[in-house]
Image (cartoon, helix red, strand yellow):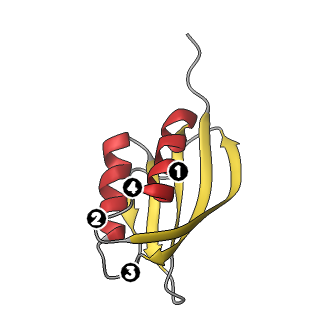
Amino acid sequence: MAASVLWAIDYEVYGEVQGVFFRKYTEEQGRKLGVVGWVKNTAHGTVTGQVQGPKEKVEIMKNWLRSVGSPMSRIDQAVFSNEREISTLEFQSFTTKY
């Protein structure tokens, strides 16, 4: 059976996503799904990052970023960019950057 295609995507989430444990929940969700990447707050009140992993798991993470988030967050919009196939994972785990 062929190995899953590895996928990478950048994201930025708009809304009430700072000060509501969004990064913590994003990190937990990424680890639960077995994807790698990172998440961090931006100076303009959004959360940005990258997800890498098997395409189907990256899709699940995209849906989570678009519609679930942390319990107290309010997601207005999630923008995904630079979606691409990769040959190897560039990160060891899912982490929060500061």
Q: Residue at x 64, y 38 (%)?
A: 87
Of tags 2 and 4, the one toward the viewer is 2
Left or right: 80, with 17 as reference point: right
- Cα gap from disc 1 to disc 2, whole angstroms: 17 Å
Circle 3 Cα neighbour tier, 10 Å, few/some/many (<14 / 14–19 / ≥20): some
Q: Position of residue 88 (x, y in %)?
A: 58, 40
* SS of the residue under disc 4: strand
Q: Residue at x 59, y 15 (%)?
A: 2
> Which residue is identified by label 2?
71
Q: Residue at x 45, y 62 (%)?
A: 38
- Cα gap from disc 4 to disc 3, whole angstroms: 18 Å
Q: Amino acid at mark 1?
A: Lys
* SS of the residue under disc 1: helix
Q: Position of residue 34 (x, y in %)?
A: 38, 41
Q: Are marks 1 and 3 in contact (CB under 8 Å)?
A: no
* SS of the residue under disc 3: loop
Q: Residue at x 48, y 42 (%)?
A: 60
Q: Amino acid at mark 4?
A: Phe
- Cα gap from disc 1 to disc 3, whole angstroms: 18 Å
> Which residue is identified by label 3?
18
> Which residue is identified by label 1?
62
> Which residue is identified by label 4?
94
Q: Are marks 2 and 4 in contact (CB under 8 Å)?
A: no
Mark 1 vs mark 3: which is more N-terminal? 3
Q: Position of residue 79 (x, y in %)?
A: 63, 64
Mark 2 vs mark 4: which is more N-terminal? 2
Of tags 4 and 3, the one toward the viewer is 3
Instruction: Kindly identify which numbered label has been placed on residue 73.
Output: none
Mark 1 vs mark 2: which is more N-terminal? 1
